[in-house]
């Protein structure tokens, strides 16, 4: 029992601490993933607004050009 007890205690401690660190690191990676996902969706929305405004300005410029040519 004298030799087995430290092995049992260290095994239990390692099992519990490895579970704790596993849950901690998985949670940390999930939080980082969600933050990056939110950042990417925000930047995608900004790019979509920029593209829409660019196409709208091109439409207005072409409309002016065709109105001038028709007159």
Image (spheres, grey):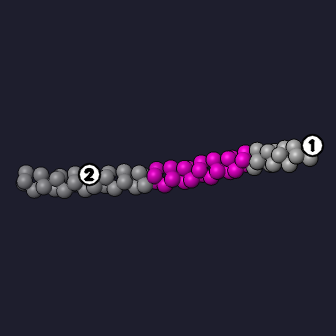
Q: Residue at x 83, y 46 (%)?
A: 7
Task: Judge whether residue 36 can be spotted in this image.
Answer: yes
Q: Earlier in the sequence, mark 1 or mark 2?
A: 1
Please provide percent x and percent y for residue 12. 81, 45
Q: Residue at x 7, y 51 (%)?
A: 70
Residue on which disc 2 sits: 55
Please provide percent x and percent y for residue 46. 40, 55
Q: Which residues are magenta?
A: 18-42
In the image shown, does 39 or 59 lie closer to the viewer? 39
Q: Which secondary structure is most common in the magenta stretch?
A: helix
- Reply yes or no: does residue 30 show up in magenta: yes
Q: Quadrant of the N terminus?
A: top right
Q: Residues within 10 Å of mark 1 (few under 14, many from 20)?
A: few
In the image shown, does 58 or 5 lie closer to the viewer? 5
Does 32 sit left or right of 9 as displayed? left
* Circle nearer the viewer, 1 or 2: 1
Q: Residue at x 88, y 46 (%)?
A: 3
Does 7 sit left or right of 47 as displayed? right
**Label 1 secondary element:** loop
Location of residue 71 by image quarter: bottom left
Count of labels in the image? 2
**Label 2 secondary element:** helix
Q: Residues within 10 Å of mark 2 (few under 14, many from 20)?
A: few
Residue on which disc 1 sits: 1
Please provide percent x and percent y for residue 58. 22, 54
In the image shown, does 3 or 8 lie closer to the viewer? 3
Q: How much space separates mark 1 and mark 2, taking CA atoms? A: 80 Å
Q: Residue at x 81, y 48 (%)?
A: 10
């Amino acid at each position: 029992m004298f030799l087995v007890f430290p092995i049992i205690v260290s095994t239990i401690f390692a099992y519990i601490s490895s579970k704790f660190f596993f849950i901690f690191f998985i949670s940390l990676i999930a939080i980082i993933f969600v933050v990056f996902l939110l950042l990417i969706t925000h930047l995608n929305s900004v790019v979509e607004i920029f593209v829409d405004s660019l196409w709208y300005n091109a439409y207005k410029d072409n409309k002016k050009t065709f109105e001038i040519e028709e007159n």
